[in-house]
Image: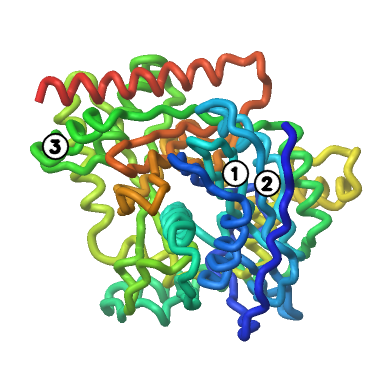
Amino acid sequence: MNFKTIEVKRENGTQDSKFKLGVMREYFRIPNNVAVIATINGNIPENDLVQVLKKVAKMHPLIGVRVVIDSNQDAWFTEECDAPLPLKVTRRKSNRQWIAILENEQKIPFDFEKGPLIRFILLKSDEISDLIVICQHSICDGISLANIIHDIMFLLSNLEIKVKRIDPVLPVPANFPAVPLQVKFKLLKNKLIIGRVNRKWDKQRVLFDDVDYQDIHKAYTQKYKHKIIAEELSRSQTSDLIEWCHQNHVTVNSALSVAFLAGRLSIRGESNDSNHLIQIAVNIRDRFKKPVKRVFGLLASGIKFEFEYLPEKTFSDNVSLFQQKVLHELNGNKTLEPLLGYYISPTLVDGINVATYGRWVSDEFSRYQKISGFIQNKTNKAVAISNQMVNNMPGLMISNLGSVKTQKEYGSLKLDQLHFVTSSSPFLDLVAGVVTANGKLTLTLNYMEEDATSNLGRNLQKIMCKSIEHLTEAVKQG
């Protein structure tokens, strides 16, 4: 693919703020990205897009950061970053062209030391274009990317507007309301337990750097290829689904989740190794002390629970049971507890990530001895925790951005639809990204392919189609 590469030089701001990664350290130096793809009707002039990206970077500081490590091994986002925003432009040739381009883009590591941790790709034609925004997960979530698309389109249709900086709001305890005494006791207990783990780690601590990350990323992407399966519902299918959910007092996300479980069961059948653990991403913007609707950042948490699709019950009954589980998990402060009780040593987080993703580093890499020796040490706390995490990975992970509010038209431009793509891993089964925009719901299944001749992709495509079939049949039956 021939790309024209444009370096979008940002304006130097008046602030050189630093923001501690904190819970975002979990995504530091690992191949975990999120992306949105906006299909836009109308012509997008390249020069206009360049000027708009400069404004968007001024609005949202995390777009232009890099990461520095201090003497205490704490990681900080810093705005002291001279690297331009990368924009690639190529001719749009088909509706599905973006899939192969984004799959290939996932192979390219972000440079944490130089920044920025975001890239833009424009697939351009005179009538319709696809704008891809891919971002390292540590600086943002899917809703933030959807908001960025709105900002870009609004500014493209209002080129003379001046923008104001929107300061980041980080998911730290000080930014949340006070929690009940019961939760405080639970957090204190967690702090004591994690404190003992940290002290044990301190005695066997190994520090990792950007060279280790580069080796890990290259080895991982040589072993596995990120693949994407994408489907869309029409406007009528989307509106019918929403109406069915309202009538049955369930959310669209619950209906979609159960549809994937039903689809998997239909295609694969039940087996002893079936994974019934569910993980759902949760938007926590409404949990902060102050409104953060337009803030760009990683403002999400999640819930986990076990759920098995029961074929002897109707699809509707399964969705109702699923909805009850979700409401139970969302009750109280459960979604905030992992953020409020984040006491784990930052270097231990790095060690866990290396133990998880470094297992594919072979002797052809410069840091092979260091990384393999670390992973083979079974008494190491980071390795033990990594193994526990891998064994507790969900069978379905779903991230639904919901219905994104957009304008019908942005001057001569119109948003046709959005797709949301999230990273997967070899340890995950079904990884779904969902978003609704302009009345159309889109879905992606994301997976890591080790062998192009395997049946995994075909199997997941069948599951996707069967899941939509289960959904549409239930809606028709009312």
Determine if residue 393 is in view: yes
Front: mark 3 or 2: 2
For the residue carrying disc 1, how many other residues have a C-alpha within 10 Å: few (<14), some (14-19), or many (20+)?
Answer: many
Q: Secondary structure at mark 2?
A: strand
Q: Which mark is residue 308?
A: none
Label 1 sits on what residue type? Answer: Leu
Residue 104's x, y, as percent? Answer: 67, 35
Image height of 334 relative to 169, above or below: above
Q: Position of residue 191 (x, y in %)?
A: 48, 73
Q: Can residue 392 be seen from the camera position used here?
A: no
**CB-based contact (under 8 Å), mark 1 and mark 2:** yes
Q: Amino acid at mark 2?
A: Lys
All told, the count of numbered labels is: 3
Q: Residue at x 73, y 57 (%)?
A: 7
Where's the C terminus, which quadrant? top left
* Front-lying residue, 12 or 448: 12
Label 2 sits on residue: 88
* Type of amino acid under label 3: Glu
Residue 390 position by quadrant: top right
Dot 3: what SS? helix
Q: CA distance from mark 3 to mark 1?
A: 35 Å
Residue underneath mark 1: 122
| Image position of 206 (left or right of 133) | right
- Give the Cα distance between marks 1 and 2: 6 Å
- Please tell me which residue is depicted at 73% across the width and 48% down the height of the picture: 5
- In the picture of the structure, the residue carrying the numbered disc 3 is 243
In x, y percent, where is residue 2?
74, 34
Say which of marks 3 and 1 sits in front: 1
Is disc 1 placed on a helix, strand or loop? strand
Separation of marks 3 and 2 at Cα, in angstroms = 40 Å
